[in-house]
């Protein structure tokens, strides 16, 4: 691959949702079920991630690293239960941090965001 491919470009907020660079796929701002419980939002973020990975012919088991942003760090056990179910033992490396989101929806809106790096070996 001689160039970086950018997909799902958001001009308003100046980011690419999917960036393919060599053997790596970078996913930013995976969210879903905004306004729902933390578990529902983790599920929604992983659903969003899965749909984006399908665009580059990958599945969740290709995810090598995730950065998880939580509004409340006490939701880590909830997130881990969802990850156990969804990743089925093929867990990515992980960094989890707490943050305040500057996002529409206020304190009851966005509680979970996941960014990911997936591996797509060339054939």
Image (spheres, rainbow, N blue to C red):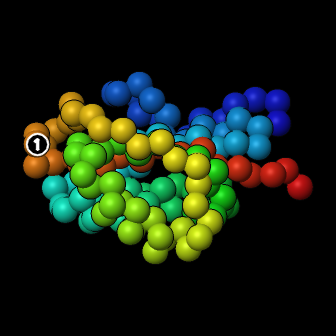
**Of all residues shown, which one is farthest toward the top?**
14
Residue 65, position in %: x, y? 58, 47
Quadrant containing the C terminus in the rendered view: bottom right
Above or below, 110 against 58 in this view is above
The residue closer to the viewer here, 3 or 103, is: 103
Above or below, 39 against 18 in this view is below
Mark 1 crowdedness (10 Å alpha carbons): few <14, some 14-19, many ≥20: few
The residue closer to the viewer here, 33 or 74, is: 74
Question: Is 106 on the left or on the right of 65, as rendered?
Answer: left
The residue closer to the viewer here, 100 or 25, is: 100
Q: Secondary structure at mark 1?
A: helix
Q: Which residue is mark 1?
A: 107
Can the viewer see residue 1? Answer: yes
Question: Is 19 on the left or on the right of 120, as rendered?
Answer: left
Above or below, 42 against 26 in this view is below
**What residue is at 54 percent from the left and 68 percent from the top?**
87
Question: Is 113 on the left or on the right of 37, as rendered?
Answer: right
**What residue is at 31 percent from the left and 63 percent from the top?**
78
Above or below, 110 against 39 in this view is above
**Of all residues shown, which one is farthest toward the right?**
123
Quadrant containing the N terminus in the rendered view: top right
Can the viewer see residue 32? Answer: no
Q: Which of the 4 image quadrants contains residue 105?
A: top left
Question: Is 15 on the left or on the right of 99, as rendered?
Answer: right
Residue 36, position in %: x, y? 18, 61
The total of numbered circles placed on residues is 1
**What residue is at 10 percent from the left and 49 percent from the top?**
108
Residue 10, position in %: x, y? 41, 33
Residue 6, position in %: x, y? 59, 35
């Amino acid at each position: 691959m001689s160039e970086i491919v950018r997909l799902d470009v958001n001009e308003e907020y100046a980011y690419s949702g999917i960036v393919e660079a060599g053997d790596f796929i970078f996913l930013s701002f995976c969210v879903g079920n905004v306004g729902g419980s933390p578990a529902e939002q983790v599920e929604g973020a992983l659903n969003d991630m899965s749909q984006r990975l399908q665009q580059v012919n990958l599945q969740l088991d290709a995810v090598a690293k995730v950065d998880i942003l939580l509004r409340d760090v006490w939701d880590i056990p909830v997130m881990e239960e969802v990850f156990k179910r969804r990743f089925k033992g093929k867990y990515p490396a992980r960094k989890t941090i707490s943050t305040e989101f500057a996002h529409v929806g206020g304190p009851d809106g966005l509680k979970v965001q996941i960014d990911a790096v997936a591996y797509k070996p060339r054939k």
